[in-house]
Image (cartoon, rainbow, N blue to C red):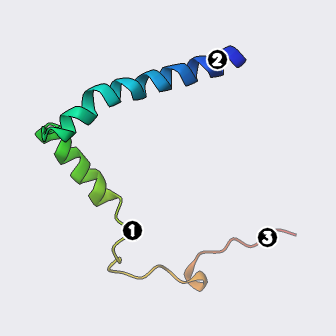
Amino acid sequence: MVSVVLSLLFITLLALAVLGVVAVPARRAGRRVLTAEGHEAVGTLRERATPGRPERDEPAPAAEDETRVPLSA
């Protein structure tokens, strides 16, 4: 189990190193990291992540309006 955890940690550190070598210098040089499709996907995700949800046109049914099944004795 320890070897699995250490392997996952090593792979994560390796991925961060590759990201640091490739993406950070490109971003500092002013190059775009994402393609146009990538920016569109990020915009879509930001729209979905907005807090709250829009109000519904009709109110939720009251508790008295629900159909109740009588309990058998």
Q: Nearer the viewer, mark 1 or mark 3?
A: 1
Of tags 3 and 2, the one toward the viewer is 2
Q: Residue at x 22, y 53 (%)?
A: 43
Q: Residue at x 49, y 20 (%)?
A: 11
Residue at point 14%, 36% (across, down): 35
Disc 1 residue crowd, few under 14, some 14–19, many 20+, Cα 10 Å: few
Q: Quarter of the image containing the N terminus?
A: top right
Residue 41 appears in the figure = yes
The residue where tag 3 is placed is 71
Identify the image quadrant of residue 8.
Answer: top right
On screen, 7 above or below 40? above
Q: Amino acid at mark 1?
A: Pro
Q: Name the secondary structure under disc 2.
A: helix
Residue at horizontal 46 percent and vertical 79 percent from the top = 60
Q: Which residue is mark 2?
A: 4
**Residue, disc 1:** 51
Left or right side of 66 for 19? left
- Relative to 5, residue 20 above or below: below
Alpha carbons under labels 1 and 2: distance apart = 37 Å
Amino acid carrying mark 2 in the image: Val
Tell me the kind of residue under disc 3: Leu
